[in-house]
Amino acid sequence: MTQRKSPDVPLLSLAMTSVLTAQFLSALADNAILIAAIAIVKSQGMLHLVPLLQESFVVPFILLAPFVGQLADAFPKGRVMLVANLVKLAGALAMVIGANPLTAYALIGIGAAMYSPAKYGILTQMFGPAVLVKANGMMEGSTIVAILLGVVLGGWLADQSLTWAFIGVVSAYSLAAFANLFIPSLPAEKSGARFHPWRLIRQFFQSLSVLFKNSDSRFSLLGTSMFWGSGTTLRLMLFAWVPAALLITDNQTPANLMGAVSVGIVLGAVGAGLWVALARVNRALLGGLLLGPSILAIAYVQDLTLAVILMVAIGICGGFFIVPLNALLQERGHETIGAGNALAVQNFAENIAMLVFVGGYGWAATAAISIRTSIIGFGLALLMATAALTVSRLKKR
């Protein structure tokens, strides 16, 4: 069992402000560049490549999962975040100079895979269990605000000028890297670790086994995987659903609807921080159970105002569901295999879910299945999955 290497710090401190600023700018750029990349493939008449864009981002998370958690635990996490942002910046610059969007976005995915275990793992070094959910709420809130601004600005700029969109993205990644410099160099959780690829792969799958044998961490992994798999697929579906249901063909409207989901997640994250402590984490199941029916309702909406309201509701359910589960996994991971390793395992599970969900949608789009039918099938599948998770969790209780 690892020990917390530093005392709790105030929620409103320079260290936390630096972490939140770096995360905000990095997440803003991540989402803006996705909209810009979608605009590129749409302008080339290759809308069917949109699911592949997301999968090119997801694959590095799966392939690098055995290594990035060890990296996050072996070095000061603030410095790992700095290097990861520089890798993202390189991917954005590659897209600027005309590299294949799939290749450039995959490079950004490599940076994001490195970044994620460090950004969440650092919270367990800074905060104890008493305030960890609140710290996660602040992290999730800043991230979702960044997603909101990123998709809205990305959609607007992509419709105006791709050049300005990329200038904004490169600037955001550069400022994020600068903010990383102000994160204190906290001790590495596992300093002196040696990197032997096969040993790391073996250790990773041992960590995976440890987490899945623990009922709390298994519950968290399955729940967060469902959330991110469904959320990622939904935002890609919007680019096909908006023209079909609302008869609007620009990039800004689906981006704005993605932003409405983000607003809801912020509200849900705030609610979770207030009402769901780790000792009462099962309360989060309510949000998960409502996600499937909310997505099903999209298939029957043909009005923009109703669509916005529904997207906010979906976000509230998601935020209420995801924040406590993230905190639960971080604490159980810190107690057993290290927070960085736990977050790497989480990314592995979540991105496999994204690959499967997005792959299913890509297959449906290739098979010319209507977007309405795809959404209905997707909502029903999610409802059954969250219901099964709820039954299993309550039986354990």
Image (cartoon, rainbow, N blue to C red):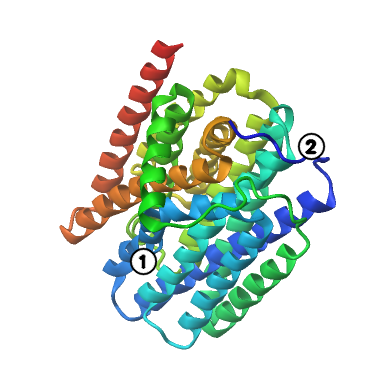
Residue 221 percent coordinates (x, y): 44, 35
Identify the residue under disc 2. 8
Q: Amino acid at mark 2?
A: Asp
At 30% from the left and 41% from the top, the residue drawn is: 378
Q: Secondary structure at mark 2?
A: loop
Question: Is 311 left or right of 352, judged from the image as shown?
Answer: right
On the image, the x and y values in percent for residue 352 come to 34, 48
Location of residue 105 by image quarter: bottom left
**Element under disc 1:** helix
Q: Tag count in the figure?
A: 2
Q: Which mark is residue 397?
A: none
Label 2 or label 1, whichever lies nearer to me, is 2
- Left or right of 91? Residue 198 is left
In whole angstroms, how far apart are the C-alphas of marks 2 and 1? 40 Å
Q: Residue furthest left?
A: 367
For residue 219, above or below residue 356 = above
Residue 112 x/y as whole percent: 51, 60
Say whether residue 299 is visible.
Answer: yes
Would you say residue 293 is visible in this rendering?
A: no
Mark 1, Cα crowd under 10 Å, few <14 / some 14-19 / many 20+, is many
Q: Label 1 is placed on what type of residue?
A: Leu
Q: Quadrant of the N terminus?
A: top right
Q: Mark 2 or 1 closer to N-term?
A: 2
Q: Residue at x 32, y 81 (%)?
A: 44
Q: Which residue is mark 1?
A: 53
Residue 88, image quadrant:
bottom right
Does residue 13 sit above or below 226 in this rendering?
below
As drawn, 390 above or below 261: above
Q: Residues within 10 Å of mark 2 (few under 14, many from 20)?
A: some
The reply to whether discs 2 and 1 touch (Cβ–Cβ < 8 Å) is no
